Amino acid sequence: MFGTTALIKHFTYAGIFLILSASEVGFPFPEDAILLFSGFLAAHGIMEPISAFLVSYSSLLATDLFLYAIGKKYGRRIVEHSRFQRLLSPERLSQLEEKFKKWGVLFVFFGRHVMGVRGQIFLVSGAMRMSLTKFIIADGTSAALSVVLMVGIGYWGGSRLQVLRRDVIRIEYIGILIFLVLGAMLFHYLRSQRRSSHK
């Protein structure tokens, strides 16, 4: 019988990957909360701990590299690109360029932990022609620290919720509820974007 647990296990990895990627490119999903949730799911056997780390890390790194490549391809013209105008304005680009010139690699490393500007920083890194090697080292190391810390905290906290551990069904419903809420947020965001584009 293909029960609820099997269904969640089947789709959870792809869901976490896609939601994290969406959060990186401007969708209203809190990255840290998703990482914590991944750790929580791993603590209760819905995800494998190592797989939770690998899926989360690969999602972040792949999306960061995508944004870096877009920035490198378009340069300062990125602010003219319709898909990224909402993510990075000309004024914001100038501000981040100044900070990038001052801090370089450290700007990428520490900036990755600042919610709301991560995607902008990766676009600017590409636009400023930062070398791919430096970007991967700075962003890859920083992303690894984020994933280990947040997934670890989620795993540690989840493993200590004894009441929930005794009630697997309740854990499944929590997972379903969270994915439904995230889906509703995504639907609302896309609908508002469509409305604004028709104005």
Image: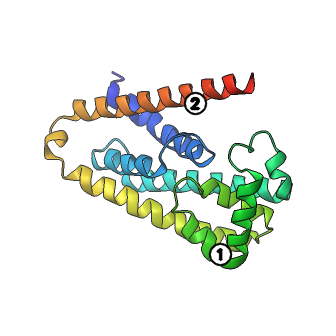
Between 192 and 112, the one lying in front of the other is 192
Label 2 CA crowd tier, 10 Å (few <14, some 14–19, many 20+)? some
Quadrant assignment for the C terminus: top right
Q: Amino acid at mark 2?
A: Tyr
Q: Tell me where residue 10 sits by quadrant.
A: top left
Please state the horizontal and vertical placement of residue 79, each as a whole percent of the image: 79, 49
Front disc: 2 or 1: 2
Total marks placed: 2
Does 24 sit left or right of 166 as displayed?
Answer: right
What is the x, y in percent for residue 176? 36, 29
| Residue that numbered label 2 is attached to | 189
Residue designated by label 1: 105
123 relative to 74 in the view: left or right = left
Name the residue: 18% across, 52% down.
Answer: 160
Please indicate whether residue 47 sits to the left or right of residue 19 in the image: left
Q: How busy is the neighbourhood of tag 1: few (under 14 within 10 Å), some, or many (20 plus)? A: some
What residue lies at 69% left-to-right and 78% top-to-bottom?
A: 102
Image location (x, y in percent) of residue 193: 66, 29
Q: Residue at image x 76%, y 70%?
A: 130
> What mark, if any, has residue 5 been given in the picture?
none
Q: How is the image coloured?
A: rainbow
